Each structure stands twice: as C-alpha cells, then as structure tokens.
Amino acid sequence: MFYHVKDLQFNARVSRPDPRFANILLEQFGGENGELAAAMQYFTQAFAAKMPYPDKYDMLMDIATEEFSHLEIVGATIQMLLKGVNGELKDAADQSEIMQAMEGSDARESLIHQALKANPQFDILSGGAPRLTNSQGIPWCASYIHSNGDLTVDLRSNLASESRAKLVYEHLMKFTDDPYVKDTLSFLMTREIAHYKMFEGALSTIAPNFPPGVLQPDPRFTQQYFNMSPTEGARGPWNEGEMPGMGKDWEYVSDPIAYVQDTEGQSKLPDSKTGELERTKELDIKTSKLKSEEVISAEPKGEAQWSNYNQK
C-alpha cells in the first residue's frame, strides 16, 4: 500500500523558467537511466526476493518507493522550469518575469517559442508539463528494466544502474546555472551514491554470491586470458597473477591461434583439469539443492498469503 505525502522529499525550487533545461531533464524523468526506470526495476525485483530474502524485499521496496519520490521531484522541477508555457499565460509572454528569462537573440522570442524549440511536445501534447519520454521525445520503455529473479544478479544490475544515474546527474549539473536546480540535482545525485552502497552492502550478506546463478564455472575454461591484440597487449590484474577471489592464477595465452590449434578447439586440455571438473559437478549439485531449498523452505504451505495483517 502506497501512501502519498504531498511534501517533496527535497525542497525543489527554480529561480526562473528554462524550457531548454526542462527538456534535458526529461532524461531523468522518462529516460533509460531515469527515476521511473529505477523505481520499476527495484519494485519488480522485490517480488522474487520476498520469500527467500524478506529483509532484501524490504530494502528493495524502500528504495523503489524513494525512487518514485525522486521521480516526483524531477517532474516538479520540470514543471517549474516550464512556468509560463501553459495556456493561461500564452497571451502574457511579455510579462517581466518571462522576459527576464530571455537573453541575447532570445529577447525577440516568447517563452512559448523557446519551449517549442526545446521540445514541441511541451506545446503540442503536454500543455507545458512533463511526459514520460527522454530528452529526444522517445517514450519510456519497459525494456529499460533489468529484473532476472536471481537476487545476486539483480543487485549487480542495480549497482550499474545507480552508477549510470549518478553520472547523468553529474552531466546535467553542467547545463544549468540555476543554483536552486543545482541543489536539487546534487541531492538526487548523492542519493544514487547512497543507494549504490545499500545494494553493495546487501550483496555482501548473501553467500555464496559468486558466480551469479547456480552453476559453477567450468575449470577448463575459467583462467585463460586470450591476447587478441598481440602487437600492443597490455598486462594487469585482469590477466596476470591471481584471479580476484578465485584462489588460482590467470593463464595468459599469448598466441590464441596456436593455442586453439594445439588443443583441437580446447577439447584436449591438461589432465589436471579432470579432477577439478568432477569437483565442479559435485558443487553444481550441492549449490542447486541449496538454492532450491532456500526458496522452497520460505514458501508458505497450503494457501498463500502475501501479507500478515495481524502483525503489529
């Protein structure tokens, strides 16, 4: 059950109209890295987490709800940036407040014309209000959402989502000189960082959480780094020394063509891998049973009920 409090989570303010920036800000309203995408991603991920991880369900729903509040902040800011574009003020474009928003050659234009140039949908379709599109007018799409039903996969997707959203806000701040708007963007950007750390903390409490899913990596093909650019191949912790968290070293294949030919398409590898492969198969069975029981044991017997209304 959602309960709407009319006050915004952050005191969003705008010092003057700016239709051009309003259009750019649509990226965080209906864009692929925007607040609606984040809210719907965490909201849908929460359902699969409810039974096996009720604590993570609570976290996902809390963050999803906060993202909806951020969507409201972005929408309110866009609406304020479009002040003067609505139908009531179209015949009053010469008023001083609107004229003060115009500089240079724009002094010969009305704010309506500015909005029309920034995004025709403001004038033609929305009447001076935000729509669920990105800054190019492309409608919001559910394909923006990453929800895989495996919490370790979903949390890693969320880390990437928060990183991208943080970067978008960082870029947006370069395109406005309104101090109030910058304060709002700074707040929203910082909450992306806070959410990142929440997801990171949640992932650290799930064991095992690597590799994603259930099946283990095939030890015959895990360690090889294929040098696909031999003329200027770089070395680093991604291809030399110990593999991070794996307890084994990278195998640097300097000549991939010769390697594939010598191993007959990697079908003939060292016998030392045979024992590892058997242990991996055993671990697959063990992990599969563990993950399955984790979910089954959390599911209610008989009639299913999502909420317990008698709990205080």
Image (spheres, rainbow, N blue to C red):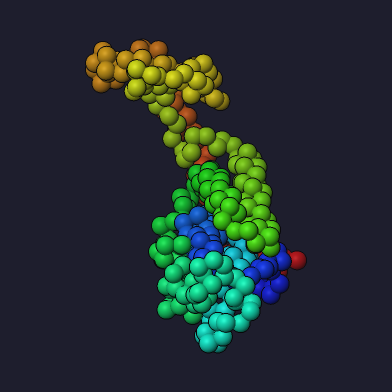
Residue 185 falls in which quadrant of the image? bottom right
In the image, residue 166 above or below residue 285: below
Q: Is residue 147 left or right of residue 1?
A: left
The spot of residue 85 in percent (x, y) is: 53, 78
The number of numbered discs placed on residues in the rendered structure image is 0
**Residue nearer the viewer, 22 or 305:** 22
Q: Quadrant of the C terminus?
A: bottom right
Report the residue that reaches farthest toward the right.
Answer: 312
The spot of residue 303 in percent (x, y) is: 54, 65
**Residue nearer the viewer, 89 or 143:** 89
The spot of residue 221 in percent (x, y) is: 38, 23
- Name the residue located 65 percent from the left edge and 62 percent from the top edge: 178
- Name the residue located 51 percent from the left edge and 69 percent from the top edge: 106
Q: Is residue 288 left or right of residue 198?
A: left
- Name the residue located 27 percent from the left edge and 18 percent from the top edge: 257
Residue 223 falls in which quadrant of the image? top left
In the image, residue 197 above or below residue 2: above
In the image, residue 116 above or below residue 141: below
Q: Quadrant of the N terminus?
A: bottom right
Residue 65 visible to an observer of this rendering: no
**Residue nearer the viewer, 212 or 86:** 86
Q: Is residue 265 left or right of residue 104?
A: left
Residue 92 visible to an observer of this rendering: yes
The spot of residue 124 in percent (x, y) is: 42, 79
**Residue nearer the viewer, 250 or 7:** 7
- Name the residue located 66 percent from the left edge and 73 percent from the top edge: 4
In the image, residue 92 above or below residue 165: below
